[in-house]
Amino acid sequence: SSELTQDPAVSVALGQTVSITCQGDSLRSYYASWYQQKPGQAPILVIYGKNNRPSGIPDRFSGSSSGTTTSLTITGAQAEDEADYYCHSRDTSGNHLLLFGGGTKLSVL
Amino acid sequence: QLQLQESGPGLVKPSETLSLTCNVSGGSISSRIYYWAWIRQSPGKGLEWIGSIYYRGSTYYSPSLKSRVTISIDTSKNQFSLQLNSVTAADTAVYYCARRGGQWDNIDYWGQGSLVTVSS
């Protein structure tokens, strides 16, 4: 089976732009989706597919991918964006096996 | 609006079986384009996929948990369930049920999560 790798922690100054990356072999074949999780809450979907946002997600969130790397970018980070972010995709070893990245804790300074 | 709600004991003894049920409301569990998943999160840790089930009963399990996990579905009650046997303290976690699939193959709905503590 494969895995998805994320940096454990990233920080950004208020109003600046930050990218959170996720690497894994399965990303050559499958789109990733990104989830935001705040303390004590369930994760919520923020980016899916090529670069799609669910209704209600601010347009400062965007996604991109290249090869085995997918990225979540927040343009003009806000204090409320401070959270854990997880990437998610399928495993290359089986169509219905799923993976999560280890998560990235985003601090907005 | 689809809603998922986990229910089950919050405390399980070591070596016993953890059992949770996810009630789905606001939509049919028999949808052909979605799978129903269990995901857990140990305290202070990341998300871990446990397994998924299709409405027809096909199941898919994490290789690391496969020997101890059973996921089942009851379409008549619009709910699906998780059983994890021979639990240890390492199985203490918040357990989420979720819906996955659709055109973009993502998890679009999550339950609020159910904390299960394994302790004697």
Image (cartoon, coloured by chain):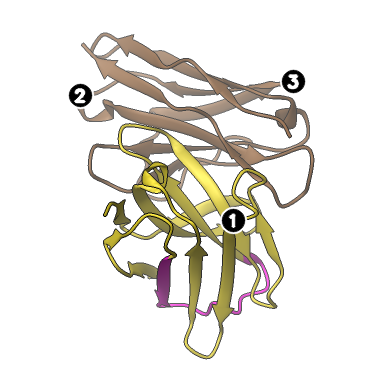
Which residue of the protein is positioned furthest toward the bottom in this rendering? B76
Q: Which residue is mark 3?
A: A67
Return the x and y of residue B40 as percentages of the image width and height: 43, 48
Q: Are marks 1 and 3 in contact (CB under 8 Å)?
A: no
Task: Indicate the colour of chain A.
Answer: brown
The span from disc 1 to disc 2 (Cα, nearest Å) is 34 Å
Instruction: Confirm whether the magenta stretch covers residue A46.
Output: no
* Marks 1 & 2, CB-CB < 8 Å contact: no
Residue B13 rendering spot, x and y as whole percentages? 33, 59
Residue A31 relative to residue A5: left or right: right
Question: Which residue does the image show at 50% across and 42% down from the upper left?
Answer: B48
Q: Position of residue B83 (x, y in %)?
A: 50, 66
Q: Is residue B99 above or below residue A21?
A: below
Quarter of the image with the N terminus of chain B in it: bottom left
Decide whether residue B31 is among the magenta residues: yes
**Distance between mark 1 and mark 3 Cα atoms:** 27 Å
Rendered hue of chain B is yellow
In the rendered structure, find residue A79 and report the number of the disc placed on it. 2
| Mark closer to the chain start, 2 or 3 | 3
Amino acid carrying label 1: it is Gly
Question: Which chain does tag 2 point to?
Answer: A
Residue range in magenta is B18-34
Image coords of residue B23 (percent x, y): 40, 75
Residue B89 higher or lower than A67, as above or below = below
- Residue behind mark 1: B51
Dots 2 and 3 on the same chain? yes
Check disc 2 and give the amino acid type: Ala
Q: Nearer the viewer, residue A30 or B50?
A: B50
